[in-house]
Image (cartoon, helix red, strand yellow):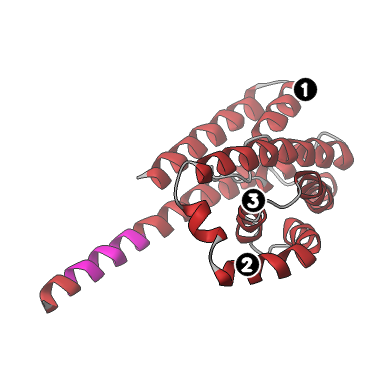
Amino acid sequence: MRKWILTAIGIILSLALGYVFLKGSRYSQLIGFFGYMSVACTLIPLPTPPYVIALGKVFDPSIVAFAGAIGNCIAAFVEYHLLLWLFSKTELQQRVETNRIFERFSYYFHRAAFVCLVVTGFTPIPFEPFRFAAILVRYNLSLYLLAVLLGRFPRYYLIAVIGDQFQIPTRYLITLLIISLVIPIIGMLIKRRTSADSEESTTNNR
């Protein structure tokens, strides 16, 4: 249920920014984009490439990358404290911290955390597992935010360059946005159906 709520929030925010991009001025687009990126890359699933490309068509890629990366740092800062607070309110934090496997993982993760966060923030490698791991092991917040900045800035810069160099038509970006919004929904529906089938099979085998 929580995933559906977060996904619905993501869709609403994505469509709201889409309206700003279609109807607003250049600078309202930039401000809207910064606000959007201050929520993106958190528990709320928000597609970012279509908007980075679109903004790269009208602004210097370095401006787009800076706005996106700083926005992500704000999002990471808020999420870091929010998740730590949520962990402290449950038994999860205590159970994890007293786990021997977690202790070993924490030791090795701290040694390579910064590089892992920068690399996954820049490349298509999933960033989420490392992001949650950093929060769970209480990785240094300043280093965490620096890793997010160093990973996201070049990523968004290169994506914005695509918009600047190729001037991709808006209709294609809208199509890309719709696909980006639909794929997670399809994934959740498949997972829900698979889970229901598994439960039904278990019940029948009893």
Residue 132 vs residue 189, the one in the foreground = 132
The alpha-carbon separation of the residues under discs 3 and 1 comes to 34 Å
Question: Of discs 2 and 1, which sits in the foreground?
Answer: 2
Q: Which residue is mark 2?
A: 103
Nearer the observer, 33 or 150:
150
- Distance from Cα at disc 3 to Cα at disc 2: 14 Å
| Label 1 CA crowd tier, 10 Å (few <14, some 14–19, many 20+) | few
Q: Nearer the viewer, mark 3 or mark 1?
A: 3
Can you give x and y, in whole percent of width and height, for residue 139 in the image? 72, 52
Q: Amino acid at mark 3?
A: Ile
Q: Secondary structure at mark 1?
A: helix
Q: Residue lying at the far bottom in this picture: please name it.
A: 205
Residue 32 image position (x, y, % from top left): 68, 27
Which numbered dot is residue 135? 3
Residue identified by numbered label 1: 27
- Identified at 11% across, 74% down, the residue is 204
Type of amino acid at the residue the image marks with label 2 = Glu
The x, y position of residue 176, in whole percent, is 59, 50
- Name the side, left or right, on which 139 lies relative to 191: right
In the foreground, 62 or 114: 114
Magenta stretch contains residue 98:
no
Residue 5: mark: none
Helix, strand or loop at label 2? It is helix
Give, as a single range, the part of the protein colored magenta.
190-201
